[in-house]
Image (spheres, grey):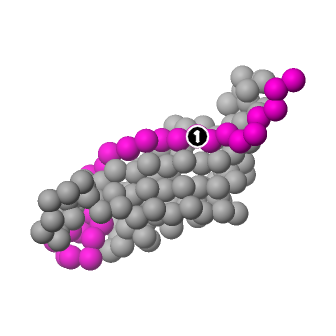
């Protein structure tokens, strides 16, 4: 018998145009963001049953992230916090949530790949 040590659902580099930022024009014009989400959950039962009810549906995770990204905030930290809290509230199987939220072209005069906030949330 094979034992599952740990299991994760990962959504990588989801792209959004959203209205987050401290500057007023960022909440009017918006900007491009990416979200990478990694949710630790026990999927051992789903590996046996082939039943979506025994796991976290990644399409439902995406919908949750899309809804939170559509709500303007000044801080990316606030957006990431909302996403983390909702995942734990809506998915009982979630044990840990890792979020990387990147603003692709922040208004800071730098040439780079963006500014990222990273969180690891636990129940």
Residue 18 in view here: no
24 up-or-down from 70: above or below: below
Q: Position of residue 95 (x, y in %)?
A: 69, 54
Q: Position of residue 56 (x, y in %)?
A: 64, 40
Observer-nearest residue: 60 or 42?
42
Q: Is residue 120 magenta?
A: no
Q: Residues within 10 Å of mark 1 (few under 14, many from 20)?
A: some
* Left or right placement of residue 57 versus residue 27 in this view: right
Q: Position of residue 72 (x, y in %)?
A: 33, 66
Q: Which residue is mark 1?
A: 9
Magenta range: 1-28
10 up-or-down from 116: above or below: above
Residue 99 in view here: yes
6 up-or-down from 92: above or below: above
Kindly identify the residue that appears in the image at 54 percent across and 55 percent down: 98
* Left or right placement of residue 83 versus residue 96 in this view: left
Locate the N terminus and report the quarter of the image it occupies: top right
Q: Is residue 18 magenta?
A: yes
Say which element carries label 1: strand
* Left or right placement of residue 112 versus residue 87 in this view: left
Kindly identify the residue that appears in the image at 52 percent across and 37 percent down: 59
Observer-nearest residue: 118 or 73?
118
* Left or right placement of residue 92 versus residue 117 in this view: right
Q: How many marks?
A: 1
Kindly identify the residue that appears in the image at 30 percent across and 63 percent down: 115
Q: Position of residue 67 (x, y in %)?
A: 43, 54
Quadrant of res 110: bottom left
Quadrant of res 101: bottom left
């Amino acid at each position: 018998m094979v034992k599952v040590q740990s299991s994760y659902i990962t959504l990588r580099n989801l792209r959004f145009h959203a209205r987050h930022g401290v500057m007023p024009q960022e909440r009017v014009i918006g900007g491009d963001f990416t979200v990478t989400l990694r949710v630790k959950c026990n999927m051992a039962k789903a590996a046996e049953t082939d039943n979506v009810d025994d796991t976290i549906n990644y399409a439902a995770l995406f919908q949750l992230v899309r809804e939170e990204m559509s709500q303007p905030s000044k801080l990316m930290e606030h957006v990431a916090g909302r996403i983390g809290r909702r995942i734990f509230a809506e998915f009982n199987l979630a044990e840990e949530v890792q979020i990387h939220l990147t603003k692709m072209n922040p208004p800071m005069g730098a040439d780079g790949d963006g500014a990222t906030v990273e969180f690891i949330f636990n129940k």
